[in-house]
Amino acid sequence: MEFGEYARNKAQSKVKYEPHFHCPLRVRRPSLHSPETMNSLLCFGGLLAIQSLAAATSSAATPQPTNAAAILEALRKNRDLPALAVVVVKDGKICDRAAVGVRKQGDPAPVTTNDLFHIGSCTKSMTATLAALLVEEGKVQWTTTIAQVFPEMKMDKRYADVTLEQLLMHRGGCPAAPPAAAWWALALEQKGTATKQRLQFIQAVLSQPPAAAPGEQFIYSNQGYAIAGAMLEKLAGKPWETLLTEKLFRPLGMKSAGFGVPGAINKVDQPWGHARLLSKTTPVQLDNPPAIGPAGTVHCSLDDLARFVMLHLQRGQGTGILLKPESFRKLHTPPAGEDYACGWLSLERGWAGGKALMHNGSNTMWYLVMWLAPEKNFAVIAATNIAGANAEKGCDDAASAMIRKWLGQR
C-alpha cells in the first residue's frame, strides 16, 4: 500500500525534485554556519511528499509490537536517530503518543512527549490559516495584491498584481532560491524588529524579476511566504509572530508554541537539532532568520500541533470553530490539476477514504511530517530532531505503523 507519492514539480522550478521516495529534494551540505547552508535550510524538506510510508514495517508474516514506544524505539535504532516522536489523533482526541531517544546526542537527557519540536515548513499551513482568519475579519482579501499593500515599495512591475492567494499556493512567480548572498547575510544578522527584517528581505526579492510569470507556474518558494506574512502584518498592524500567537495559538490552547530554536541556548531543557557533518552526528541550535519566519520557524509540542491538526480535520464543523467551512475549503482545495492548496498538499489516498492533507518540513536540523485524513477524522504526526534521508524514512515508518495500528490498513 502506498501512503504517499513524491511531490510533482509541475512548474519545473529551479528547486530540483526527483521521483525518489525518501529525499526528492536534494541540497548540498556545506558548513552549517555558511550563508550557503542557511540559504537552503527551509528549502530542504519544504515540499517532500511520501511515496511509501510502510516498507520497513509492513511485513504481515512477522508479528509487530503494538506499543507505540516499542515501535518507535525499534525504528529509531534502525534509522540511527537521536529521537523519534509520534502523536495520533482520532475522532477529535489524541489516542496515542510516544517519544523515544535523547534530546541531544551525547547527553543522557531523554526526550519526552511534552518536548518541543521544530516544525519547519509545516509553519506554512499556519500562515495560510492566519490569512483565512484575517480574510474573515475583513482585514485582507484573497485577491489583495502586493502593490495594494506596499504601494511605496519599488518592485518589478510583474509582481504588482500578484495576489495573497497566489503566494500561498506558490504560484506568485517568486523564486525558489533567496535573493543575493548579501541580502541573505543581512537577514542572518537579524538587526531590527522581525517586521523590519521581513520588509528588507521582501524588498530584495521583489526588486528582482520573478522566476516565472505570476499565476502560470507552481514554484515552491519560502520567499513567497515571507511576502505573504509581511502583507498580513502590514494590514493587521501587528507582527506576524504576534498575529499567529493571538489569533491561532491562544484560541487553540497551544501554550508551548513559539518561534526559532526550541529551549534555551546551550542548555538541554529541550531537544536540540542535529546535522550530519562528515559522517558525524552533530548537535546544533540554529534556525532560519525571522525574515522568512512565515515560511517555517515555528516550534511546539506535538500535542499542541495536534490541536492545530484537529482544527483542520473538523473543517469548520461543530462548535468553537475558528473558521467557516468555506474558509477551510479554500485552504484545502488546490487549483484544478494541481496538488498544492494553501499551505497543504491534497492527495488522494485509499487509507484516508479520499483526500488526505499532508505537509512536512525541515530546517536541515529537524524533520516533521503531518498526515491528515478528514474523512476518517484521523491524523498522525511524526517528528525527529535530525534531518536527512534516515529522518524521513524513520518518520515515514512511524506514520505507517500508526496508520496500520489505528485504521487497520496495510
Image: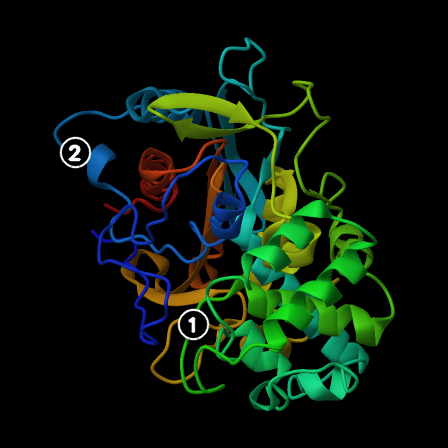
For label 2, the residue is: 59
Image quadrant holding the C terminus, namely: top left
Left of 1 or right of it: where is 78?
right
Q: Tag 2 or tag 1, which sits nearer the N-term?
A: 2
- Residue 364 lies, with reference to residue 350, above or below; the image says above
- Residue 180 lies, with reference to residue 386, above or below; the image says below
For label 1, the residue is: 219
Tell me the quarter of the picture where residue 157 sits. Answer: bottom right
Left of 328 or right of it: where is 380?
left
Give the image location of residue 86, x and y in percent: 48, 35
- Disc 2 is placed on an element classified as loop
Residue flagged by tag 2: what amino acid is it? Ser
The local crowd at label 1, few if under 14, some if 14 to 19, many if 20 or more residues have their Cα within 10 Å, is many
x 42%, y 50%: residue: 45
Tell me the quarter of the picture where residue 203 sits. Answer: bottom right
- Residue 267 lies, with reference to residue 376, above or below; the image says above
Left of 230 or right of it: where is 313?
left
